Image (spheres, rainbow, N blue to C red):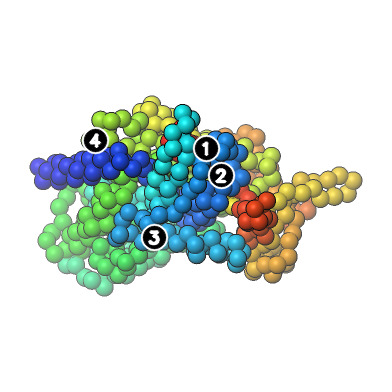
Amino acid sequence: MASGFSAFLEDARLTVQALRDFGSHLVHPTVRLGVTGLSRAGKTVFITALVHGLVRGGRFPVFESLATGRIARARLEPQPDDAIPRFDYERHLRALIDERRWPDSTTDISELRLAVDYQSRGGAERTLVIDIVDYPGEWLLDLPLLETSYEQWSAQSLALSHSGPRARLAADWHAHLALLRPLAPADEQEVLTAARLFTAYLKACRDERFAMSTLPPGRFLLPGAMAGTPAVTFAPLKVSAGDEPPAGSLWAMMRRRFESYKSAIVRPFFREHFARLDRQIVLVDALAAFNAGPAALHDLEAAMAAILDCFRVGRRTLLSALIRPRIDRILFAATKADHLHHASHDRLEAVLKEMMREALDRAGTTGAITDAIAIAAVRATREAEVKQGRGRLPAIVGTPVAGETSGSDTFDGETDIATFPGDLPENVEALFKDGAAFQGLSAAPATQADFRFMRFRPPVLETDASGKPALPHIRLDRALQFLIGDRLT
């Protein structure tokens, strides 16, 4: 009964917020665009490049309203939520253009408001407000916890920790877990040690050598202001789902803190931010999974399915907007397409679609519009052909980040090099069946050098006819057309 009443109150709060937003949007048409992705997927770069391209009128031939000249101007405005940090667009842009370094990663939620003045196809002068909400994808994977008990989560986490490469990474935590007695009196030091070892295991899974993606609770990796609080100081235990913990026991303490995590962290994020989104893009670093191998790719596949299941998919109608908002367009984007030759861009897109196939089909039956594409919000490389014997090989040219290594070579961050990225397989289904398709992805057979998906610095920018620097990209305009093109007609 208590749980049903809580759900009723939550629905009531969401309905009130939806009515407030709906009334505001009638006066000032607004799209709340969520931008998320797991660590290192490129969220900050995507938002910076998107805003820069709109504000300065970038090269976006597929973005119809800009390409046809119907957008008069785009400008930044003060963000609407005073309690949310502003996305630091100017600092991130300086990092990309002046310092030629990638901006710092997303560690908390932030917002940025962009107003776009445009002419409708009928000739009317209008303004569309775009509220960009940037948040870590790890937080999104926490939403299923709202419907999960501590005992269910413990069982799921333990089962996952014994699979594939995770078992070795979890060895220290498993050793400590074997010493714990869930029915014994709670001991704060035991809890602190368990939480520390469990968090260390999650962080090890996220390392680029393993590139695991399914790693809730998300705040254990990105705690923000909650670092050190009891709400993020707990860990799974070997307990039975059908039993009740004795008062004052270790089990009871862990369960209470798990419930506090949901009520103090997950539910406010859902209510105040996630449930208010209209459109969503999820950025995916599929190349990191390729680097790490089949286990990482399967883990990413599971994480993407879990993420899509989190969305309240379905076509937005007047009734749904009044009762509860729905995300009616979701775009999944495989980033860093510039690390591959253009011949593999469509294959990277096909890999993402295969990864999301079942989940996208489920979303499609509800009326939501979904798609999956390969992009590079800022293109760090250019393509070239390199002479090799009597033939010529397709290559990409860029400046490796200082300290990047390949074999015995260490790069200084100033010198351009040509690399030979392998072709992704035409049969993308093979990637999900075994590891055979991963052979040959590192470099062309003629060189055998390990330049596999190397990290490159942002490019030296060219200027357009107006003398302004233009950030090169791959298919960023296609992403914009999908996400907001229909709202600028």
Q: Would you identify the image quadrant in which residue 367 lies?
A: top left
3D distance between C-alphas at marks 3 and 4 = 28 Å
3D distance between C-alphas at marks 2 and 4 = 32 Å
Give the residue number, with chain letter if any, for mark 1.
70
Q: Would you identify the image quadrant in which residue 10 lies?
A: top left
Q: Is residue 290 visible?
A: no
Seen at 33% across and 43% down, the residue is 28
Q: What x and y, as percent, mark residue 331?
A: 47, 39
Question: Mark 2–mark 4 contact, CB under 8 Å?
Answer: no
Give the residue number, with chain letter if any, for mark 3.
86
Seen at 42% across and 39% down, the residue is 126
3D distance between C-alphas at marks 1 and 4 = 31 Å
Q: Secondary structure at mark 1?
A: loop
Give the residue number, with chain letter if any, for mark 2.
476
3D distance between C-alphas at marks 1 and 3 = 28 Å
Viewer-proximal residue, 259 or 74? 74
Front label number (1 vs 3): 1
Q: Is residue 1 left or right of residue 151?
A: left
Q: Secondary structure at mark 4?
A: helix
Give the residue number, with chain letter if any, for mark 4.
322
Q: Is residue 382 left or right of residue 133?
A: right
